[in-house]
Image (cartoon, grey):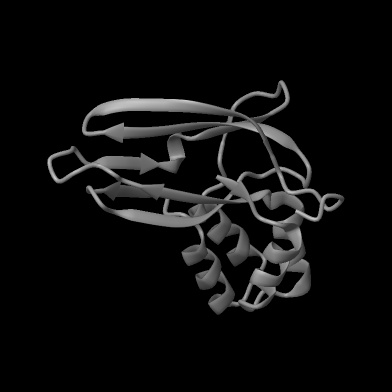
Amino acid sequence: MRALPLDAVHAFFLARGFRAAEAKRIVEVGCVHKLAATHDGDGVDAAVSIDLAAWRVRSAEGPWRPLALREEWAQTWEKMNVAKPAQIAFYWALFPTQQIFAPGDRNWGMVPMGFAPGTPFDLKAVWYVGEKRLESVLTHLQCASPEAGT
């Protein structure tokens, strides 16, 4: 999990057909991170599944809340009349809401955490190995900050 620099996020979405105000909105409320996931097991290991709907984030001592998933963003862009090609580019740039990994599978994508730039936060990640539910809380993560250039 890595925060993507604000200028890179802005440029990425401008290059995919978003108007300047729309790309700015992603930067201002997105707190976009790159998530890379792999199943490093051998061929006899159980599948690993991820459902981002079960993941939670919180800032400081705030309450845990769900992520804004690609499906919710799609509704936002539809209401704002974002160009269809830009909506499609955004949808496919995000990490899938649900995915099952067989041994050797890997994927990556963007995950908007939904905070302002520079906000520190915690993330509760949930995944399944076969039927066994596992979770981990990643603490002291931070949204990219304009002051740091990241």
Q: Is residue 60 left or right of residue 70?
A: right
| Residue positioned 24% across, 42% down in the render | 41
Residue sitting farthest toward the left? 44
Q: In the image, is residue 129 above or below residue 29?
A: above
| Residue positioned 61% across, 58% down in the render | 76
Quadrant location of residue 128? top left
| Residue positioned 67% across, 66% down in the render | 80
Q: Nearer the viewer, residue 21 or 110?
A: 110
Residue sitting farthest toward the right? 147
Q: Position of residue 147 (x, y in %)?
A: 87, 50
Q: In the image, is residue 139 above or below residue 32?
A: above
Q: Is residue 115 left or right of residue 34?
A: right
Quadrant into which the N terminus falls: top right
Quadrant location of residue 122? top right
Q: Nearer the viewer, residue 149 or 128?
A: 149
Q: Is residue 117 left or right of residue 138?
A: right
| Residue positioned 49% across, 57% down in the render | 109
Q: Position of residue 119 (x, y in %)?
A: 76, 38
Q: How many marks?
A: 0
Q: Nearer the viewer, residue 34 or 80?
A: 34
Q: Position of residue 25 (x, y in %)?
A: 74, 59
Q: Position of residue 130 (x, y in %)?
A: 21, 33
